[in-house]
Image: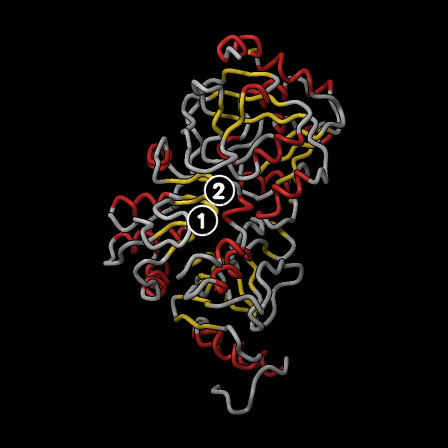
Amino acid sequence: MNYEAEYQKKLTSADEAVKVVKSGDWVDYGWCVGTAEELDIALAKRTDELSDVKVRGGILFHEPAIFAREDAGEHFCWNSWHMSGVERKLVGKGVGYYNPLRYSELPRWYRENTGPVDVAMFQVAPMDKHGYFNFGPSASHMMAMCEQAKYIIVEVNENMPRCLGGWESEIHISQVDAIVEGANKPLGELGAGGAPTDVDRAVAELVVKEIPDGACLQLGIGGMPNTIGAMIAESDLKDLGVHTEMYVDAFVDIAKAGKITGARKSIDRGRQAYAFGAGTKKMYDYIDDNPALMSVPVDYTNDARTIAKIDNFISINNAVDVDLYGQVNAESAGTKQISGAGGQMDFVMGAYLSKGGKSFICLSSTFKSKDGTLNSRIRPTLANGSTVTDTRPQVMYIVTEYGLVNLKGTSTWQRAEKLISVAHPDFRDELAKEAEKMGIWRASNKR
C-alpha cells in the first residue's frame, strides 16, 4: 500500500466528514486530550438537521461546540466515562450524564459490543512512515472502541505527542475511513492547581515516609497527589518505578530528579507504564517519543492481577469524604456527580495484593461550604445519595493532616476509633457520639 496516496484519497474537510452522522447515532469523541475539536465544530453546524445523537467521551477540557446552543439537549446528549469540571456543568444543564463503570472494564465493554459505535472521531498524531496514527497519551480503550466503530474519522494534530512502548497505541490508515487535518491547536492542559497548602504538605509528609526504595508508584489526579509527587522528587528515594492509570506532571518532576529507573520492577522493567496522560506542555514534551515510557490499554494498567505482580506497589488517591465504617466516596457530593469511579478501586485492591504494597486514600480533614461553615470530611455515614467508590473491606490507609491509619482487618469499633483520631479535633466528640448511636463504639474507647 502506498500510504501517502491512501492518505490523500481519504483526506477531506471536517464539514464533509461529519455528514456521515445521522439522527439517533452513537458517536464517540475520543478521550481526554484526544477529544475531537474541528470535527466537533463541524458537527455543531448540523445541529438543526440532527436529533437524539448520543455522544461518548471523557475528561473534557472545554465545552464541546455541539452544546453551545440553549436547545442543544434536543439534539445531542453527552455520556461521560469520567467527568471533569466541564462535564459537571453539562450534567447541570441537563445535557450530560455519567456512565458508571470501572475504567479497567472499558476495552472489554467495547469489544463485547455492549453498545453501538456508529461513528468514532478523535484527534491523533500525524501519520508515521509505516502508515500509523498514534493515539497520543490516550491508548486507554481507543483500539477496542475503534474495532467496534462502523466509521472512523481521525483528526490530525501536529501538537499531539507520539507515545510509544506498548500496544494498541495507534491505528493504521487501512482501518481509517476519513482523515481531517485539524487546526493544530495546543493540547488541553490540566495543571496541579494552586500552590500546595499546609494540609497538602502535612499529608504528603506522612505518605512519603511509607514509601521504600524501589517502590512502584500510581498517583491520582489533584493537588494532594501532585504535592506528594513533588516531595518524592525532593526526597532521598531511589530506583522508583511507575505503573499508573494516569500520567501526570508530578512523574516528570520525579523522573528528572533521577528518582525513576524502574530497575526493580518485576514486570516492564525500566518502563513507566500508563493508560493515558493529562498535564501541562512540560509533560506532553517529556512523553513525546520517549522510550522510557510505555503507552498501553487501561485493561492492562488497571487490572488488579497485573498490579499484584509488582512488588512494593504504592497507590495514592484522593477522596471527597469517608464515613466511620471506612467507606470511601471519591466521586460525588450527595447525588451530585463530580468525578467518576475511574481506577481507584482497582488500584486499592491491586496494591494490597502486591507484596509489600500499600494504598493510600488522602483527604483534608475538613472543607468549607459556600457560607463559610466548616464541615468534616470524616462523617458518621456518607451523605444521602453519595457514591461508595471503595467499599470498606477494600480500604487500607486513610490519611489526613492529623495522621495516617490502617483500616485493613479492623473491626467496626476499631476503624471508627482510628478514623476519629485523624478527624479535625473540633468534630471528634460529635463523631464519637454518633459512633455510639450506631453501635460501633465500645465503652473502653477514649472519648
Q: Would you call the spot at circle 1 few (<14 residues within 10 Å), some (14-19), or many (20 or more)?
A: many
Q: Position of residue 370 (x, y in %)?
A: 51, 54
Residue that label 1 marks:
244
Residue that label 2 marks:
275
Mark 1 or 2, nearer chain start: 1
Do residues under tags 1 and 2 come within 8 Å of each other at their CB atoms?
yes
> In the current view of this chain or complex, which residue is farthest to the bottom?
444
The foreground one among 42 and 56 is: 56
Quadrant of the rendered image containing residue 187: top left
Q: Position of residue 23 (x, y in %)?
A: 75, 24
The local secondary structure at tag 1 comes to: strand
Label 1 to label 2: alpha-carbon separation: 7 Å
Q: Position of residue 425 (x, y in %)?
A: 43, 75
Q: Is residue 245 above or below residue 115?
A: below
Residue drawn at 46 percent across, 45 percent down:
246
User: Can the viewer see residue 375?
Assistant: no
Residue drawn at 71 percent across, 37 percent down:
113
The foreground one among 415 and 263 is: 263
Q: Position of residue 207 (x, y in %)?
A: 36, 63
Residue drawn at 50 percent across, 63 percent down:
353
The local secondary structure at tag 2 comes to: strand
Q: Is residue 232 above or below residue 21?
A: below
Q: Amino acid at mark 2?
A: Ala
Q: Amino acid at mark 1?
A: Thr
User: Can the viewer see residue 233?
Assistant: yes
Residue drawn at 72 percent across, 19 percent down:
48
Q: Would you call the spot at circle 2 few (<14 residues within 10 Å), some (14-19), or many (20 or more)?
A: many
Quadrant of the rendered image containing residue 30: top right
Colouring: secondary structure
Q: Which mark is residue 319?
A: none
Answer left or right for 34 relative to 148: left
